[in-house]
Amino acid sequence: MCRVPCAIYTGFPVIQGTLYDLARLADVNNATSGEPAPLPGELAARLRAVVGTLVRSARTVDRLASVPAAVLGLLDTGGPMTTADLAAARGVRHQTMAATVRELTDAGFLAVRPDPDDARRKVLTLTREGKETLDADRRQRVGVLADAMEETLDEEDRRALAHALDLVERISDSIRGGRSFDGEREFSTGSW
């Protein structure tokens, strides 16, 4: 039984279609058919939609809802943080993050300790249960994606998908390397 907001598994037919769409984005055979290349804006809109659908579909098997999972993920990859650090990383107000931190702490997924450098501040870390829950969600998501790939994609499609992922990584590296949003996000979820 989940003690924080949870998602419910609804199957993965959407994932199968999304994987096929992503593989088609990099289908080298179709790309050389003589048609003009799509404009970057068109590709960007389609990529955002496809990746968003894929992520949401894969998360339907998660025990944790997306916001608590994102907080646990930040602590897993970034190490101990304060509530203020987490709020800044997610682009939300401190009060919004404090409520999420309280839920995760009450569920036993976070531990709160005094900051060794400033006793007035509290540092948050993952508990063993928080780490195990996060890792279980990640493993389950990978399994769902792998199953959908096996059912949907042939060897040629998997090669096209691998190529598409190389391209997506290049785009991601370019974005991380140069652009960031300074200021307050419009919506409290911090997602787009």
Image: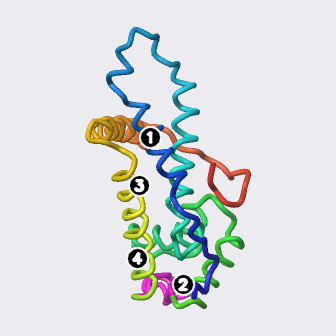
Q: Mark 3 points at which residue?
A: 148
Q: Mark 1 points at which residue?
A: 20
27 relative position to 68: left or right? left
Q: Answer yes or no: do the residues labelled 4 and 3 have beta carbons within 8 Å? A: no
Quote the CA–CA distance across marks 2 and 3.
42 Å
- Eye-nearest disc, 2 or 4: 4
Q: Earlier in the sequence, mark 2 or mark 3?
A: 2
Q: Name the residue under label 2.
A: 122
Q: Answer yes or no: do the residues labelled 2 and 3 have beta carbons within 8 Å? A: no
Quote the CA–CA distance across marks 1 and 3.
10 Å
Q: Quadrant of residue 68?
A: bottom right
Which residue type carries mark 3? Ala
Quadrant where the N terminus is found in the figure = bottom right
Which residue type carries mark 2? Lys
Quote the CA–CA distance across marks 2 and 4.
27 Å
Q: Give the range drawn in magenta.
A: 109-127
| Residue 83 pos. (x, y %) | 58, 75
Q: How many C-alpha atoms fall within 10 Å of the one at disc 1: few (<14), some, or many (≥20)?
A: some
Which residue type carries mark 4? Ala
Out of 5 and 109, give the one closest to the viewer. 5
Out of 120 and 179, give the one closest to the viewer. 179
Q: Earlier in the sequence, mark 4 or mark 3?
A: 4
- Eye-nearest disc, 2 or 3: 3
Say which element carries label 1.
helix
Who's the residue at 61% across and 86% down the image? 3
Say which element carries label 2.
strand
Out of 158 and 164, give the one closest to the viewer. 158
Q: Earlier in the sequence, mark 2 or mark 4?
A: 2
| Residue 59 pos. (x, y %) | 53, 63
Quote the CA–CA distance across marks 1 and 4.
26 Å
| Residue 191 pos. (x, y %) | 62, 53
Q: Mark 4 points at which residue?
A: 136
